[in-house]
Image (cartoon, rainbow, N blue to C red):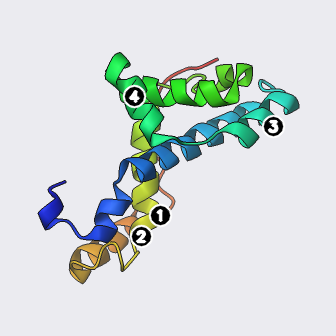
Amino acid sequence: MIARYTRPEMAELWSLESRYRAWLEVELAVCEAWHEQGVISVEDMAAIRDKAAINVDRIEEIEATTRHDVIAFLTSLEEKIGPAARFIHLGCTSSDIVDSAGALLLAQNAFDTDALQTNVVPRLNLALLGLGTVGTYLTGRARKTI
């Protein structure tokens, strides 16, 4: 984003902190699903829930070495969580996390008038488009993970 053309609310929405929080939310949802399937134990899931946290500075530091944002993100989580971190990202690709988190941010903020106060018409069009697809089955990923 070009700072001089970006409203502060929009800059915050797409900040590294916000994106990493969304990535973490997606990763935790994946872990919860694995936990429900019996793949992740109660103890390991508790460790993941309790210790998972975002440190943007640490992620950037790791990324300077790895040159891969998702690997840096996962490595920083592993440092905080410990052995239970082996379940984070299980069965996922980087695109699974990044794309899902992007969609999550859009869905959570699509009607946030502070962040998206530029024009009502595009928001209404987006809402109408969404309403037209209610009940439609979509395939987002076609990857066997078991």
**Which numbered dot is residue 108?**
1
Mark 2 in CB contact with mark 1 (< 8 angstroms) = no
Of marks 3 and 2, the one in the foreground: 3
Question: Who's the residue at 14% across and 56% down the image?
Answer: 2
Cβ–Cβ below 8 Å for labels 3 and 2?
A: no
Three-letter code, disc 4: Glu
Question: Residue 16 vs residue 136: left or right?
Answer: left
- Which of labels 4 and 3 is toward the front? 4
- The disc, 3 or 2, on the residue closer to the chain's N-terminal end is 3
Query: Nearest the camera: 7 or 88?
Result: 7
Give the CA separation, mark 2 to mark 1.
Answer: 16 Å
Q: Give residue 118's mark.
A: none
Label 3 sits on a secondary structure element that is helix
Residue corresponding to mark 4: 61
Q: Mark 2 highlights which residue?
A: 131
Disc 2 versus disc 4: distance between alpha carbons? Answer: 42 Å
Mark 4 or 3 closer to N-term? Answer: 3
43 with respect to 107 (left or right): right
Crowding near pointer 2: few (<14 within 10 Å), some, many (20+)?
few
Q: Secondary structure at mark 1?
A: helix
Mark identifier at residue 46: 3
What SS does tag 2 mark? helix
- The front one of 43 and 109 is 43
